[in-house]
Image (spheres, rainbow, N blue to C red):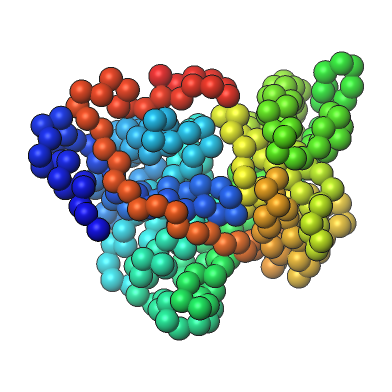
Amino acid sequence: MHDYGTRLIHHNGSYDNARTLHVVDSHTCGQTTRVIMDSGENLVGLSPTAARDHFRTQADWVRRMAVLEPRGHRSMFAAALIAPSAAGEPFGIVFMDANGYPDMCGHATIGVVTTLCELALIPSIDLGTDGHFQLPLLTPVGTLAIEVEIKDGRCQAVSFQIPQAYYIGSVEVDTGHGKKTTVEIAYGGQYYGFVESDSVGLSVQPDLIDELIEKAKFIRQELGRTSTLSDPLTGVVPSVGNIVWIDEPRAEGADGLNVPVSGAHSFDRSPCGTATCARMAVRVAKGLLKVGDDFVNESIMGTHYRGRIVKEERKDGSTYLVPRVTGSAWITALSQLVVSKYDPLGNGFLIGGGKAVV
């Protein structure tokens, strides 16, 4: 392979001392993850929360360069690696999207672990040996328990468990035109509001995504204006940026169908890992799911995650769950992102589909 990156950096004065990012792109059941292999920032010894705060306050250029146009798009998602502080220690990650720095992302977790495995960066995992392997992964929400299935020389599937998911409650909101609908609010690593798509005269299908995004904007505003439901752990009324449209599944064997729409007006092509965790919390609260049951969640693209509740605990009148989600990812590109010192848009921008970033 020609090393065009080295040729560009060393033979073109426009790129002297250029900011560069080495990235590996993948998709998890349709949703992109851009793994930032080396941001150039000194993250050694930092926890994921400390590293996240460092990026947010001192190095937001990394997120903008990796996620925004012209190198990314509104639905682009990135994860910056924190290398192990010593041999045998786990990797950490910081999640990034067009809206900022989410605490947790399921599809990106699957994409990161797949990338690390298929680049042979986890010493305990050998692609030549079929089997199931366990490892920890450090994130802003805590240490995730990861299981990797290796089969036929590749990372066949990745499962993750988050520390907790829980149901918060339901709120009735206006849909416009004098009608109301119910929003079920739950936490699964992020806060989600679940709404039946047929309550606004729509269904979850690709041809209707623009209408679903626009309707989600209205529901989000109404929810923020009217909801008084507080998080049972914090006592604070959460800001619910993610509206998840739910529908009857179409694929044989699927138990649910959804498409999440974020506060940045992007949508998830995958079933969304954290939304699947939160959706299971709603179903447990409604008596539709119990510990040990599988929940197969279908995406707007027809891809699937398999969820399961592995543990349930009641405390102070609320039910807290440990959910597990399994999915697969595929590497799509190995790239070096660069910014010319003469590029007037080098810091990234975002136009169309929502609030502009310039």
In x, y percent, where is residue 221? 69, 22
Query: Residue drawn 39% across and 35% down?
Result: 71
Residue placed at 74% from the left, 45% from the top? 258
In-image side of 132 versus 248 (left or right): left
Whether residue 207 is visible, yes or no, is yes
Q: Residue at x 31, y 58 (%)?
A: 83
State the quadrant of the N terminus: bottom left
Displayed quadrant of residue 212? top right
**Number of disc labels:** 0
Q: x, y percentage for residue 264?
A: 56, 29
When asked about the image quadrant of residue 41, the answer is top left
Tell whether 251 sits left or right of 321: right
Q: Is residue 128 left or right of residue 192?
A: left
Given residues 291 and 247, the one toward you in this image is 247
Tell me residue 342's x, y (percent).
20, 23
Kindly give the residue lying farthest to the top in the view shown: 177
Q: Is residue 88 above or below residue 214?
A: below
